[in-house]
Image: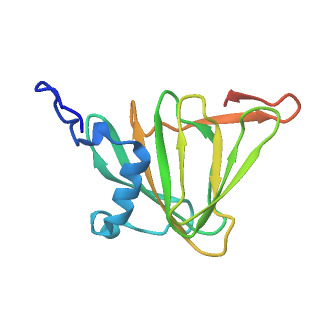
Amino acid sequence: MFAVPENTIALPQSHAALHPVRIALDTAARRERWAHLLRYDPETRFAALVDKTPEQEVWLMSWLPGQRAELHDHGVTSGAFTVVSGSLTEVVTPGPTQVLHHLVAGQSRVFGPSYVHQVRNDGADPAVTIHVYRDGGRTVRPVRFDPLDGTTSAR
């Protein structure tokens, strides 16, 4: 047994205290919060704002086969995304080589400042994702990758 000091207080259970992956997974599980927003656009991937607080934004995205988010970073923003259905390929560009992550429903990825990636639907079925953006909201900055020296630069 151990004693708990009288001045001990519980951590708040606000979204600010939760990891962005936990928020993405919780939002994905609560389909009633976003199902009415879901659309599939044959021209480009679809995005809809699900929730916005002073600390973060939660977005729903849909990806038809062949759709992609070109190589980009998120500026000073950090966050995470979770695949709700279907599958996606994430191409991460940490240096001279590119790393592929094949993601299926239930899997998540995190990102932070200077994280450069591309996300695409290489599968035969549509995909749905939930994204959580912190520290400035949904920021997407196009990036150019130089395969000769492995550097990235803003477009």
Query: Left or right: where does residue 125 sit relative to residue 47?
Result: right
From what the image shows, is residue 86 above or below residue 28? Answer: below
Picture mark count: 0
Image coordinates for residue 26, horizontal then vertical, percent: 35, 57
Image coordinates for residue 43, horizontal then vertical, percent: 57, 64
Q: Nearer the viewer, residue 110 or 32?
A: 110
Q: Give the quadrant of the C terminus.
A: top right
| Identity of the residue drawn at 39% across and 67% down | 38
Q: Nearer the viewer, residue 81 or 148?
A: 81
| Identity of the residue drawn at 54% across and 59% down | 107
| Identity of the residue drawn at 81% across and 39% down | 97
Image coordinates for residue 11, horizontal then vertical, percent: 23, 35
Residue 117 found in image quarter: top right
From what the image shows, is residue 47 above or below residue 143? Answer: below
Query: Left or right: where does residue 114 sit relative to residue 150?
Result: left
Query: Left or right: where does residue 52 sit relative to residue 146?
Result: left
From what the image shows, is residue 85 above or below residue 153? Answer: below
> Residue most toward the front?
1
Q: Give the quadrant of the N terminus.
A: top left
From what the image shows, is residue 7 above or below residue 134? Answer: above
Query: Left or right: where does residue 17 sit relative to residue 48?
Result: left
Q: Nearer the viewer, residue 37 or 8?
A: 8
| Identity of the residue drawn at 23% across and 43% down | 13
Image coordinates for residue 126, horizontal then vertical, percent: 56, 71
